[in-house]
């Protein structure tokens, strides 16, 4: 029953990656071994079996959340595979080994088929997915830059857009970790995407700094009017996509002319104007570099050969943060959900009660790492329904041509 969700998740996240398919199979084997250990030994004590499965799911989910790399899928699979395999066989523990072996064969065949279809029929590389998301992110960043420079929209709207762009940048960073597992991606593309990400991370604080200086200069009408022209010109260049290299050079020249000379007699206003001009030039440089990097990525060229105008002050190497408290809370929540469903199942004698803890384990594990899992739940349910219906149709088609008719 949970195989549809498993394969839908595998196909959407691990688009044809043979190495990650092997990692998925490894997680399935670990879960199968756990099922063989738990079910025969605790079959006569349903309360202890429920506790053991819940703890197994919670512990492996915690390890998955802490790992934070594509390898984390091994731990997550090892956890909820026990729920997929153990709950349906609790009434026939003597057949655990045979049923688990058959189920592992089915799951393995499903993973292989999903990988083959994703590779040959509907190929989509991680690099292309990252490039598409980066293009959409840069479009949003340009729109935010225009709003900041022209003063369009309210402060709350711009703050919400910054939060959205920061969340999308985090998703792109998570997806970028899969590049190491995709052998089809060239080293030039991987390096280009890394450099592009460094420039993207510099844009949000840069736009915030520009907005702070514009707000400070708004108190001085004469100075504000003086810089309004160059801000409007920069916003117009962003609105046109930032592709005009000659206009970018003209903007740099205009910004150099507008930058006041700072000496011992320079006042606070001159310092603020100089800071605004410097950051506007950085904005033009970064946007130009992003265009060059995207062209190099599309052509597969080495990004080191590009004459980039902007260089980050320090390498923006992502250092993953491991929040043990939040990971423990998420894992404990899923484990308690499984345990509560099992308790209700045992207390009421619900004939089909196996569905509740199974879905609690699978959906809870898949959505534990999401900041806001609510929008993803309908997507998983639609994927499960679609996979289940296609499976039923295939089964009916196969058996209808067999020696024994099957009513569908």
Image (cartoon, grey):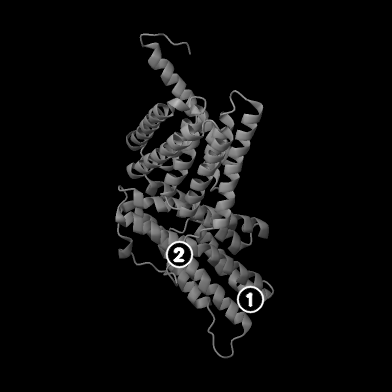
Of the pair 254 and 197, the residue shown nearer to us: 197
Q: Looking at the picture, how far across and down is residue 9, in whole percent?
A: 46, 38
Considering only vertical position in the picture, is 59 above or below 101? below
Q: Looking at the picture, how far across and down is residue 204, in whole percent?
A: 54, 62
Quarter of image, res 193: bottom left
Q: Is residue 72 left or right of residue 373?
A: left
Of the pair 310 and 384, the residue shown nearer to us: 384
Residue 379 visible in image: no
Q: Is residue 295 left or right of residue 324?
A: left
Residue density around tag 2, few if under 14, some if 14–19, many if 20 or more, within 10 Å: many
What's the distance in space between the residues labelled 1 and 2, CA to CA?
26 Å
Residue 56 visible in image: yes
Q: Looking at the picture, how far across and down is residue 382, in whole percent?
A: 53, 32
Q: Residue at x 54, y 54 (%)?
A: 167
Quarter of image, res 107: top left
Residue that badge 1 annotates: 223
Residue lying at the far bottom of the rendered structure: 264
Q: Is residue 156 left or right of residue 130?
A: right
Q: Residue at x 60, y 67 (%)?
A: 211
Q: Residue at x 44, y 11 (%)?
A: 406
Of the pair 4 and 184, the residue shown nearer to us: 4
Of the pair 299 and 324, the residue shown nearer to us: 324
For mark 1, give the secondary structure.
helix
For mark 2, give the secondary structure.
helix
Q: Looking at the picture, how far across and down is residue 205, in whole percent?
A: 55, 66
Q: Is residue 233 left or right of residue 293?
A: right
Residue that badge 2 annotates: 286
Quarter of image, res 265: bottom right
Considering only vertical position in the picture, is 88 above or below 82? above
Query: Do the numbered discs 1 and 2 sit on residues whose CB atoms are within 8 Å?
Result: no
First along the sequence among labels 1 and 2: 1
Residue density around tag 1, few if under 14, some if 14–19, many if 20 or more, within 10 Å: some
């Amino acid at each position: 029953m949970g195989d549809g969700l498993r394969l839908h998740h595998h196909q959407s996240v691990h688009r044809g990656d043979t190495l990650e398919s092997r990692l998925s199979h490894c997680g399935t084997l670990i879960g199968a071994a756990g099922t063989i250990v738990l079910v025969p030994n605790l079959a006569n004590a349903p309360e202890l079996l429920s506790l053991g499965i819940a703890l197994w799911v919670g512990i492996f989910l915690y390890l998955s959340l802490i790992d934070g790399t594509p390898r984390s899928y091994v731990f997550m699979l090892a956890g909820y595979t026990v729920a997929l395999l153990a709950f349906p066989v609790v009434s026939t523990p003597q057949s655990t080994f045979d049923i688990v072996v058959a189920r592992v064969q089915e799951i393995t065949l499903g993973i292989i088929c999903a990988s083959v279809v994703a590779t040959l029929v509907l190929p989509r590389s991680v690099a292309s997915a990252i490039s598409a998301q980066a293009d959409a992110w840069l479009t949003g960043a340009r729109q935010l830059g225009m709003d900041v420079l022209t003063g369009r929209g309210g402060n709350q709207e711009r703050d919400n857009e910054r939060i959205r762009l920061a969340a999308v940048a985090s998703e792109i960073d998570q997806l970028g970790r899969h590049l190491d597992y995709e052998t089809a991606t060239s080293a030039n593309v991987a390096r280009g995407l890394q450099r592009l990400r460094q420039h993207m991370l510099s844009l949000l604080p840069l736009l915030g700094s520009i907005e702070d200086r514009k707000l400070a200069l708004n108190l001085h009408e004469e100075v504000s009017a003086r810089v309004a022209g160059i801000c409007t010109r920069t916003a117009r260049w962003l609105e046109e996509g930032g592709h005009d290299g000659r206009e970018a050079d003209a903007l740099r020249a205009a910004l150099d002319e507008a930058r006041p000379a700072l000496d011992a007699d320079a006042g606070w206003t001159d310092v603020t104007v100089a800071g605004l001009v410097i950051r506007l030039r950085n904005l033009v440089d970064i946007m130009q570099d992003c265009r060059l990097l995207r062209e190099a990525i599309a052509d597969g060229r080495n990004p080191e050969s590009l004459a980039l105008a902007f260089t980050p002050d320090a390498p923006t190497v992502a250092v993953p943060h491991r929040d043990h408290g939040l990971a423990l809370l998420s894992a404990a929540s899923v484990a308690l959900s499984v345990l509560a469903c099992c308790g209700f199942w045992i207390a009421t004698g619900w004939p089909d009660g196996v569905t509740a803890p199974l879905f609690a384990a699978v959906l809870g594990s898949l959505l534990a790492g999401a900041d806001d899992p609510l929008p993803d739940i309908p997507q998983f349910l639609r994927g499960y329904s679609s996979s289940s219906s296609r499976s039923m149709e295939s089964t009916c088609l196969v058996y209808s041509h067999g020696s024994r008719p099957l009513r569908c």
